[in-house]
Amino acid sequence: MVDPLGRIRRSTRLRTLRVSIASLAVLVGAGTFALGPTQVGLSMTVNETFVGGNRQVLYGSVEDGDGEPVPRTIVRLFHRADGHRVWDMRTRTDGDGLYRKVLHEEPGRYQVVIRLAGTDIRARRAIRLRDGWQVLVSAEVTEDGQLTLLPIFHY
């Protein structure tokens, strides 16, 4: 507002200053988010295939965003009983980022947890174990921190 002498009122200056500071804070925050370090996460895929017989097979691979293998990644399998986790299997990927385990578990619902060695980066996915079926659970390291579950059609 301008008074009769043409001077800007003090309240208008304060309001303009507040809006400017708020705008600057938003811009700095957005710039920090856009230019800041990326987060790392895991993207998991699951596929079940009937192969016959009475075996259950859990297998898969872990790769980075460039398709390179991630060795020594921890793969664990658990189920819930009486409200508690019961860990059924633990293994690591080999030098080619692969793992494979023949299981002898009761058919039912289980959880697979894949965790990058030496970090807290992990992802979990529900699977169903059945006799005569093999279950592919693979993961890819992502750089955005999102855990997306994608379909897979071949291995």
Image: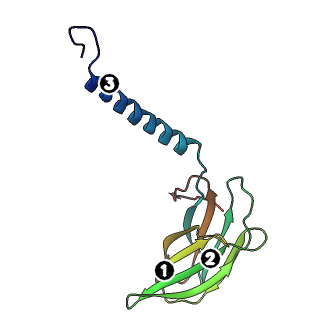
Question: Considering the image in quadrants, where does the C terminus appear?
Answer: bottom right
* Left or right: residue 58 compared with residue 30: right
Left or right of residue 127: residue 51 = right
Q: Which residue is mark 3?
A: 13
Evaluate if marks 3 and 2 touch, with contact meaning CB atoms under 8 Å apart: no
Q: Residue at x 31, y 29 (%)?
A: 14
Give, as a three-letter code, the residue at label 2.
Answer: Val
Label 1 secondary element: strand
Q: Specify whether residue 55 is in view.
A: no
Which mark is first along the chain, 1 or 2? 2
Compared to 119, does 86 lie above or below? below
Which of discs 3 and 2 lies nearer the camera? The answer is: 3
Percent coordinates x, y for residue 132 in the rendering: 56, 81
Number of marks present in the image shown: 3
The residue lying toward the viewer, choosing from 136 and 90, is 90
Q: Residues within 10 Å of mark 2 (few under 14, many from 20)?
A: many
Measured as percent of width and height from the top left, residue 142 is found at: 61, 55
Residue hosting label 1: 110
The image quadrant of residue 73 is bottom right
Q: Which residue is mark 2?
A: 75
Residue at x-position 73% and y-position 68%: 97
Alpha carbon distance from label 2 to label 1: 13 Å
Percent across and percent down for residue 147 are 52, 59
Residue type marked 1:
Tyr
Foreground disc of the pair 3, 1? 3
Residue lying furthest right: 95
Determine which quarter of the picture holds residue 133: bottom right
Q: Residues within 10 Å of mark 3 (few under 14, many from 20)?
A: few
Residue 12 disc label: none
Residue 112 visible from this viewpoint? yes
